[in-house]
Amino acid sequence: MDFGYSLSYVFEDERWISKLAMLLLFTLLSAVPLLGLLALAVALGYLVELVGNVRTGFVRPLPEWDNIEEKFRLGGYLLIAWFIYHIPFVLFNAGTSWLFGVVGGGFLGDATTLVIACCLLPFSLIYILAAWCLFAVGVIEYSDTGQIGVFFRFTELLWVLRRYSSLTIQWVIMAFFINVLLALLALIPCLGWIAAPALAIPWQGHLLGQYARHVGVDSDRRKDKVRRKSPPKGPR
């Protein structure tokens, strides 16, 4: 995967200003209560199309804004899957908060709370990392099929992560550094406040699209199954 190209490819598109301006608009609107969910769905649909374009090998992968309804549909299902993926995390933290309340205050209670937090925090972080890796592979398949069910084929998603473990680690590291760059960019007054939200999806989407070129459930696993089930060829 080419980390540098994930950052620079945007400016090769002749219409990059208008495309990013529209994306920035929907990204900013996503902060508005209720209406923000609709805008966020459109922005996520743009991400899905971008991943698919990069995976296909388009020279100019930034999608056009001529099919907002389709982007809303794709992003809406993606948003539903995202919420479902985070239900265990929310329940886990709710249970942890309840446990902290039961323990109570005082010196002994505070010490017990600290011990419990130190023990449970690693599990929370591990779940978030595993869920996001599974979700990323789900997005890859979703960009190809458009079916929300791919997010819940956990056996096949885990199969992809095991088979491409080194590539997945590489993607996680690069995605982390992109987030660091976006955070640093957001610290720049005015210009950074505009550029960071406008570039977040194009940068992360292109990197995920590069990752998508090498992995896949429907393509790779189907070929593997066919190869195992095919009878051996005898002598001609």
Image (cartoon, rainbow, N blue to C red):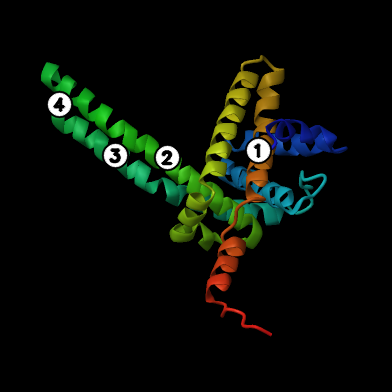
> Residue at position x 68%, y 33% from top?
3
Marks 1 & 4, CB-CB < 8 Å contact:
no
| Image quarter in which the C terminus is found | bottom right
The residue positioned farthest toward the top in the image shown: 189
Residue 9 image offset from top left, x and y in percent: 78, 35
Give amino acid for label 4: Gly
* Circle nearer the N terminus (4, 2): 4
Dot 3 surroundings within 10 Å: few (below 14), some, or many (20 or more)? few
Disc 4 to disc 2, how far (Cα)? 28 Å
User: CB atoms at circles 1 and 2 under 8 Å apart?
Assistant: no
Label 3–label 2 contact, CB within 8 A? no
Label 3: element kind: helix
Q: Which is nearer the N-term, disc 1 or disc 4?
A: 4
Q: Dot 2 corresponds to which residue?
A: 128
Snapshot quadrant of residue 19: top right
Instruction: Please state which of the two labelled residues, at mark 1 or mark 2, is closer to the viewer.
Output: 2
Q: Residues within 10 Å of mark 4 (few under 14, many from 20)?
A: few
Residue to which mark 4 is pinned: 104
Q: Foreground mark, 4 or 2?
A: 2
Residue 152 position within the rendered picture, expressed as x and y whole percent measured from the top left:
46, 59
On the image, the x and y values in percent for residue 224 come to 56, 66
Residue type of the residue flagged with mark 1: Ile
What residue does disc 1 label? 201
**Front tag of 3 and 1:** 1
Discs 4, 2 touching: Cβ within 8 Å: no
State which tag comes first along the sequence, 1 or 2: 2
Which disc number belongs to residue 94? 3
CA–CA distance in space, label 1 to label 2:
20 Å
